[in-house]
Image (cartoon, rainbow, N blue to C red):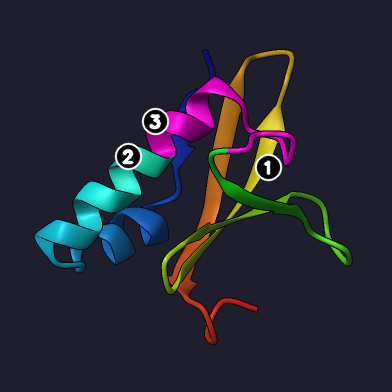
């Protein structure tokens, strides 16, 4: 199982969400820990075209992350509303 490491701006973004959204984000992160690649049918994941990393969609929120396979770590770099993250 992968470990998720959150950047402080992602922590700040999640902490400002309402309890229902926090719960939904937590559930998606738990699924992401099992398989952080687009082959995961339970998540809306895409490989980023222009940059390194992947995009996770949780409702109207988007999270940008990178995977370190040797250490089984997912670095959650950005999290924001759909129109503000790209």
Which residue is at a point 20% across and 67% down the rendered structure image? 17
> Could you say which is closer to the camera, residue 39 or residue 80?
39
Q: Is residue 49 above or below residue 43?
A: below
Q: Position of residue 7 (x, y in %)?
A: 45, 49
Q: Which mark is residue 39?
A: none
Q: Which mark is residue 66?
A: 1
**Could you tell me if the residues under marks 2 and 3 are in contact, i.e. CB atoms within 8 Å?**
yes
The residue at the far front in this view is 41
Magenta span: 29-41
**In the shown orientation, is residue 59 left or right of residue 16?**
right
Which residue is at a point 51% across and 79% down the rendered structure image? 82
Secondary element at image label 1: strand
> Could you say which is closer to the camera, residue 22 or residue 41?
41
**Could you tell me if the residues under marks 1 and 2 are in contact, i.e. CB atoms within 8 Å?**
no
Q: Position of residue 84 (x, y in %)?
A: 52, 84
Which residue is at a point 73% across and 41% down the rendered structure image? 38
Residue 37 counted in the magenta span: yes
Q: Position of residue 77 (x, y in %)?
A: 55, 53
Secondary element at image label 3: helix
Q: Could you tell me how far apart the alpha carbons at marks 1 and 3 are, in whole angstroms?
A: 16 Å
**Could you tell me if the residues under marks 1 and 3 are in contact, i.e. CB atoms within 8 Å?**
no
Which circle, 1 or 3, is nearer the viewer?
Answer: 3
Residue underneath mark 3: 30
Residue 44 counted in the magenta span: no
Q: Determine crowd level at label 2: few under 14, some 14-19, many 20+ residues with C-alpha closer than 10 A.
A: few
Which residue is at a point 33% across and 50% down the rendered structure image? 25
């Amino acid at each position: 199982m992968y470990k998720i490491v959150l950047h402080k701006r992602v922590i700040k973004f999640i902490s400002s969400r309402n309890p229902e959204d926090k719960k939904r984000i937590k559930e998606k992160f738990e699924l992401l820990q099992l398989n952080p690649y687009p082959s995961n049918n339970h998540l809306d994941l895409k490989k980023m075209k222009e940059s390194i990393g992947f995009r996770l969609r949780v409702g109207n929120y988007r999270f940008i992350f990178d995977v370190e396979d040797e250490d089984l770590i997912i670095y959650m770099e950005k999290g924001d509303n759909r129109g503000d993250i790209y």
